Amino acid sequence: MTITAALLGNYKTKYGPWFDALPEIDTFANLLPFRQEQKIGEKYQVAFLAGLEHGQTASRAGGLFTLNAAIGAEIPRAELDGSTIMHRIQYAWDDVYASLNGDLTSYGDIMSKKMKAGGKAASMYRDLALAYGPGAGSVLASNIGVVSTVSAALSTTPTVRLTRASYIQGLWPSMRNGLVDIYASDGTTLRVADVTILGTPNQNKTHVKMFKSGSAVTLAVGDQIIPKGWRQNSAIGVEAIMNTQTGTIFTVDVSSITQFRTLQQDAGNGPLTRKLIREWAARVAANGSKQGGVLKCSGSAFAGLAEEFSALNRDTTMGGVKKQGESKLVFETPAGDISVEVWDCCKQGQAMYVANSCNAYRVGTTDLTQRPIKGLNEGFLTPLIDQAGCQSVMYSNQAPFIEENWHNFIVQNIVSPGDAQDAA
């Protein structure tokens, strides 16, 4: 609309209500209850039965035959430490006082607005740590994205393409202004730290816009992305737990102790189907998983599965308003009822099944909190000594733990029609 310049003084600027443009993420933490009664001190430790008594003897001789040596049961221990995440929010006194009159001067007081943004962010980072924490090892065990093509220099604000399989559609819009570190494909060599995420220019493609002032670094194929400072400082996430097939996890040798090794499944670069889910369920059922569970997948993977489901269920009733579609699917399988659900931060090419019988939970000193000790200020609210403002902090210390990994499975190489595309 164009207004005659000489008449501009007659018109006012009108404002609509404030709104939150960022999505609420269905938290992954719901799958992993926090065991308040199992808060860790120095570390968390649990013993388990890994081997039976095998001191058996067979004989047809009768009489006083000689017995074979006893082979005792094996009862090793598993242990882990929690990982701390502190989320800091700062407020300038000028901003606080300028907004105290509510809608008379602003959309609301700045502390409430920033606290809400901080709470959503803290919940998101907690979910990323639980699902994709790279762990404390020398090599990254997990990431939140993998680069698929060579980029331009980071100082030129390039649009970086991620692989279709590693792309998380529900994550990147909420990562605007967040910082990430980028490592080479070996998971050890730091390529560049403190890279700013600027957004997603095209959500139909696996594009993420990044920037670092003065950096001549160009990202390479296979480079891995993690949140700032997480390598060797984060929990071992569920993805890393499920993908560990050799070596140790929780100090347990998964190469020889099957109970701590998750079944890995391959969708064969095809969609998620009911046939595959039933086959995978039969395999974990053989390990004693009979109580059902939840299979978390991306929205595009779920859409493909739901389309197959709808094609097999025809409505033959006459007349009336028809409503068709699914928000959750439940399959009856040898492993019990498997609920297939969308998680907004699931990678496109991957799905993770957490069985009800696997004893998956979170341990640590505390879940996400703003008031750790009764009587202290909400949000650790403290004045800044050398700056004109104050600060609040959200704190958590936790890590996921799974007692019987062989009741679960992880699926790789899912390709769905609705995926964001790895394309220019």
Image (tube, grey):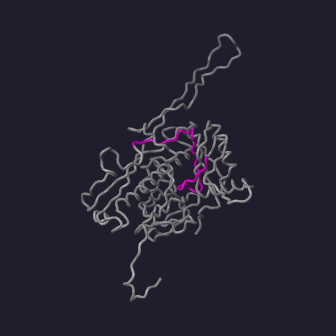
Q: From what the image shows, is residue 292 above or below residue 391?
A: above
The quarter of the picture where the C terminus appears is bottom right
Counting the numbered discs, the total is 0
Q: Quadrant of residue 211?
A: bottom left
Q: Is residue 300 shown left or right of residue 185?
A: right
Which residue lies at the image location 65% right of the left edge and 37% below the top edge? 286
For the question of whether residue 160 can be seen, the reply is yes
Residue 347: in magenta span: yes
Q: Is residue 165 left or right of residue 78?
A: right
Q: Position of residue 327 (x, y in %)?
A: 60, 54
Report the magenta residues as a range. 339-365
Image coordinates for residue 272, horizontal then vertical, percent: 65, 53
Between residue 311 and residue 167, name the one nearer to us: 311
Q: Which residue is outermost to the front?
A: 320
Residue in view at x 43 percent, y 45 percent: 398
Task: Name the residue at the left extreme.
Answer: 385
For residue 213, above or below residue 234: below
Report which quarter residue 13 is drawn in: bottom left
User: Going 35% across and 46% down the picture, which residue do you hit?
Assistant: 372
- In the rendered image, the residue lying farthest to the top is 63
Please tell me which residue lies in front, 7 or 144.
7
Q: Which residue: 68% across, 59% down?
A: 322
Q: Is residue 361 magenta?
A: yes
> Is residue 222 visible to us here?
no
Q: Image quarter for residue 205?
A: bottom right
Residue 183 percent across, percent down from the top left? 47, 57
